[in-house]
Amino acid sequence: MSLAPETTAPRWIALWPAGMLGLFFLVPFGIMLAVSVAHRDMGGFYTWAFEWNSYARFLSAFFGKVMAVSLGVSLTAGAICVALAFPFTVFLSGMGAKAQTRVLVTLLSVLALSEVIIGFALSTILSQTAGIGNIFYWLGLIDAPQAFAPSLFALILGLCYIGFPFAVLVLYPPVSRLDPEIVEAARVMGASGPRAFFGVIVPNLRGAIVGAFILVFVFTLGSYLLPQLLGRSEHWTLSVHITDQAIYQSNLPFAAAMSVFLMLVALSLVGLASLAGRDRGAK
Amino acid sequence: MTRVLKTTYVVVILLMLLAPLAVVAAVSLNGAQSLRFPPRDLSLRWYGELFQQSEWLVPLAHSLIIAACAAALAVVIALPLALYAWERRGLMARLLTGLGLAPFTLPPVISALGFMIFWMTLGGYGQIYATILSHAIFLVTLPLVTISLGLGGLDRALIEAARVMGANRWTVFRTVIAPLLLPYVISGYAFAFVLSLNEYIIAYMVAGFTVETLPIKIFNALRYGYTPILAVVSVIFAALSALIFGLIGKFGNLPALLGAERIGK
């Protein structure tokens, strides 16, 4: 019998994906890095140079405010999403396979929806003519039907709307892997439902919860359309400003510098999340 | 907590997620050009209107072409990558996997700006193939994750058996691995397809002014006021996503695909 090769796939098979990802992901990144230190040309483009001018603008009050808004809004939305999604996921993983599949299909369908559609749907439901304002008016809570968007409240609601299904899907694998016998044991020992939940389930999944919170935070940080559709211009996030600088202000170096900054923030957060998920993740 | 309370919690949250879509579905039935809820003069007029206006049909065609091609290319890149990384633990395997996961993990605006500058430099800016390639790279993560899951669940004994019987690599792949992997390849394709269809910022920054996709068209139309036709498009998109994920749920093991281990074994 001839010696069969150890692996199923030959080594050279990696050349094609490596080439594609290298050319179309790493090279664009490299160019972006180079542009972030290029010199801004008033003509709309840039000339190659090596200067820190675009990064120096981070020290301005404008940028500080943008960062504060971006981080504040996303942190709030991330916290609300995880607080709602964690019990949801625990209950979900206790359901039958068929019910779980149905709930997951619903969540995936909502998650996949374009932000523009979600923004449109939410601004409709918060509007004067078709919105919940009418219900409040009808109930006698307010004097006249009113619109609730655009506002900071509407923006955070929108971010929670996109963040919630994401939070459930991030929490789903560790939660569904948690040994049901641990909870069973606690119940047998006489712990009440809520006591078993906070005393056994939550501590066992602390790492997963922190990890999910950070990932949802990064996810909402990337939202681009909701701040424009549901918020006012003072609620614009970093993502909106990057696009605005690149396309409407024709300041590619500044846009690239902000993008590099956002990437560093996101990468370190994602690294933190995977560390958090590792230490006490249920296994 | 009792079973009823748990189920109520799950159902109430799902209803809250579905409420805005239900309102949109209702306002899409307005007869006149206004977004009233409850709708007045019920009619399907705007559904017919959508399929007659080239203003909407062209972006719809763009979106479908881009999604179909980008998802296919994403699978073609992800499959060999997953196969390579499957049985290898080296630095190269981990690096490549990381590279495949990165575009989707980072805030999309970063990739979008990278692609925009890249295509401006190379000359593809504003072309449909630039959008397709950019989407394919951005979405590689999805088929990579589903195919890797499928490979992880393969029974090694089957492969060993085929090898002992004298099958070479290609025969093993064709007769043993490929048929077992097919459902995971298809769901990876479907995930990438749906997300490409709904993706806005990359499509916008790479070719938004020349190749209008449906999400871009909706956003542009929103500036000129809200009309029932926007609601119609939203309903169709939501229904399409639900249909595709519903099919995956029916014919595949969705909980396992999303990382649950205790189900369906």
Image (cartoon, coloured by chain):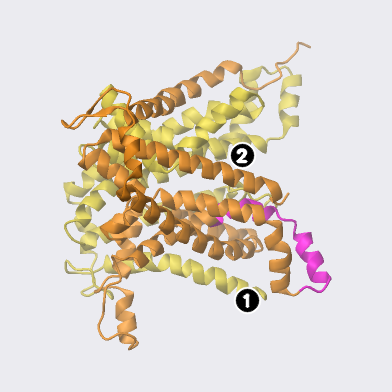
Chain colours: A orange, B yellow
Q: Position of residue A184 (x, y in %)?
A: 78, 65
Q: Residues within 10 Å of mark 2 (few under 14, many from 20)?
A: some
**What element does badge 1 sit on?**
helix
Magenta-highlighted residues:
A168-191
Quadrant position of residue A92 = bottom right
Q: Which residue is mark 2?
A: B149
Question: How far apart, in angstroms, are the residues tagged by discs 2 and 1?
Answer: 34 Å
Visible residue check, residue A282: yes
| Image point (25%, 74%), residue name | A128
| Image point (45%, 33%), residue name | B74
Q: Which residue is mark 1?
A: B4
Q: Position of residue A248 (x, y in %)?
A: 21, 42
Q: Position of residue A148 (x, y in %)?
A: 30, 71
Nearest the eye: A129 or B62: A129
Nearest the eye: A255 or B92: A255
- Using the image, name the chain to which the residue with label 1 belongs: B
Q: Position of residue A161 (x, y in %)?
A: 43, 61
- Using the image, name the chain to which the residue with label 2 belongs: B
Quadrant position of residue A233 = bottom left
Visible residue check, residue B232: no
Compared with residue A42, is residue B212 higher up or lower down, i.e. above or below?
below
Instruction: Name which residue type carries label 1.
Output: Val
Residues indicated by labels 2 and 1 sit on the same polypeptide chain: yes
Instruction: Name which residue type carries label 2.
Output: Leu
